Image (cartoon, helix red, strand yellow):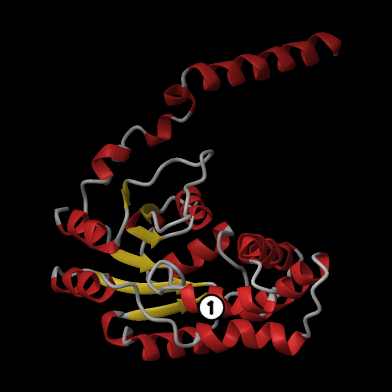
Amino acid sequence: MIHKKNNRRDFIKKTAMVGLAAPHLAFSSTLNEPSKTESTNIRPKVLFFDVNETLLDLTAMKESVGKVLGNRNDLLPLWFTTMLQYSLVSTVGRQYNDFGIIGAAALQMVASNHGITLTEEQARESILGPIRSLPAHPEVKAALQKLKDAGYKLVSFTNSSNKGVETQFKNAGLLEYFDERLSIEDMGKFKPHTDAYDWAARKMQIKPEECLLVAAHGWDIAGAIWANWRGAFISRPGAQLYPLAEKPEIIASNLTVIADKLIALK
């Protein structure tokens, strides 16, 4: 019996070593699939777009939040990361609250930790007031139109609520560019949970590898790539890719460059 257990243990170790030394042997089922390089030369079936910061300029909201934090603009990154952290805490805990409500709660937490008194109403109004009327980044409308003219299907995909993004698009003049709007409100798990990307692909009735996400957040691009999507990263000021995730196929400073690269695909 002991001899058999040792043999089994040795076999597992050898198998693991083969997988580490020669992954193409351990995962031979993928040999007939297109390589990563080949797939990036093919047009994705649907372009998904993150909304806030990717398409919309957050300057007005940052100014509003900075004001209630006593003009402590250095606290803005901490507030955003706290908001993202607790959206994921909610997802892991199988809870759901509107992303804006989580943002207000996170703002109260940051304020309290820095000796700033902030009511729930003040926190919500500082976020929800300006976020409804954010303008699009200067190049966005023309770039979206070029993509539509080139035959691409455009879908917004956001952690914000359905009503929230509809209001944003109406005020920013973006409604006409999108074939569909998807909000994680309809499935209850925030990006970058893999289930969110899987759900969006199913909604559009396509395979994950036929999806491409355009986003200005490294965590969003990482989540999409881990869900077997393709990615295009807009390196807005202050935005960084996650070094431990594979790089997306397109990295550019604005949507115009990304649109041109996507239109060039066959």
Above or below for 156 versus 84:
below
Above or below for 139 versus 219:
below
Q: Residue extending furthest front?
A: 71
Type of amino acid at the residue the image marks with label 1: Met
Q: Position of residue 36 (x, y in %)?
A: 32, 39
Q: Which residue is drawn at the image coordinates 30% and 66% (left, top)?
A: 46
Closer to us: 150 or 235: 235
Q: Position of residue 29 (x, y in %)?
A: 41, 34
| 190 sits to left or right of 32 | right
Badge 1 is on which residue? 61
Q: Position of residue 186 (x, y in %)?
A: 56, 80
Closer to us: 85 or 134: 134
> Does any portion of residue 177 appear in the rendered image?
yes
Q: Residues within 10 Å of mark 1 (few under 14, many from 20)?
A: some
- Secondary structure found at label 1: helix
Closer to us: 192 or 134: 134
Tell me the quarter of the picture where residue 104 sits: bottom right
Q: Position of residue 107 (x, y in %)?
A: 71, 73
Q: Which residue is drawn at the image coordinates 62% and 73% (left, top)?
A: 66
Above or below for 210 versus 127:
above
Q: Which residue is drawn at the image coordinates 68% and 61% (left, top)?
A: 85
Closer to us: 22 or 58: 58
> Does any portion of residue 95 appear in the rendered image?
no
